[in-house]
Image (cartoon, rainbow, N blue to C red):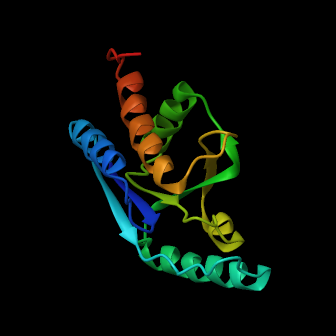
Amino acid sequence: MSLRIRILVIGKTRSKFLQAGNAEYLKRLQPYAKAEIVTLAAEKIPPNPAAATVAAIKAAEARTLLAAVTPGEYLIALSPEGEELTSGGFAALLDELALRGESRLAFAVGGTLGWDDTVLKAARRVLSLSRLTFTHELVRLILVEQLYRAFKISRGEPYHY
């Protein structure tokens, strides 16, 4: 069974160095899984948006994300409020999902404002990469690196620390 991973992201990755890093880790993941980053449209955020505007933007981005999740995908949302795992724990989670037959994973990375609660409720798992705050563009790179690290850990292969 081949694992398929889609990383669903709101908005483009603008920084060239982050684009290069994402491409590098997606290439490294090829022996382990079919992985791709799928860019979804971000809503325009006006300067100093009112709370109601923020809520409307988050709701619209949630609808965009949920429409992109295909039937049968195991949705994992990334959120600062999610469960924190060690790299070994993340590897164990991926192994557990594979053993349960979950061969199609979708990781949801929010935009600038984060996720509306509808995404967090729809997700089968909510994870946090750290209690530190990262840009939504940097989170993408951290996620693909951690996916690669998880596969290396699971297979007992060396990884440069």
Question: In the rendered view of the protein, which quadrant contains the C terminus?
Answer: top left
State the residue lying farthest toward the front: 47
- Can residue 97 be seen here? The reply is yes
- Residue 156 left/right relative to 137: left
Residue at the spot 51% in from the left edge and 31% down from the top edge: 92
- Image position, residue 122 (x, y; %): 62, 68
- Residue 137 left/right relative to 115: left
Compared to residue 37, the image places residue 18 above or below, namely above
- Image position, residue 99 (x, y; %): 44, 40
- Residue 130 left/right relative to 28: right
Q: How many marks?
A: 0
Compared to residue 155, the image places residue 85 above or below, namely below
Residue at the spot 61% in from the left edge and 81% down from the top edge: 46
The residue closer to the viewer here, 28 or 2, is 28
Residue at the spot 41% in from the left edge and 38% down from the top edge: 147
- Can residue 1 be seen here? The reply is no
- Image position, residue 106 (x, y; %): 44, 58
Which image quadrant is residue 8 in? bottom left
Residue at the spot 67% in from the left edge and 85% down from the top edge: 56
The residue closer to the viewer here, 55 or 120, is 55
- Residue 159 left/right relative to 146: left
- Image position, residue 124 (x, y; %): 60, 58
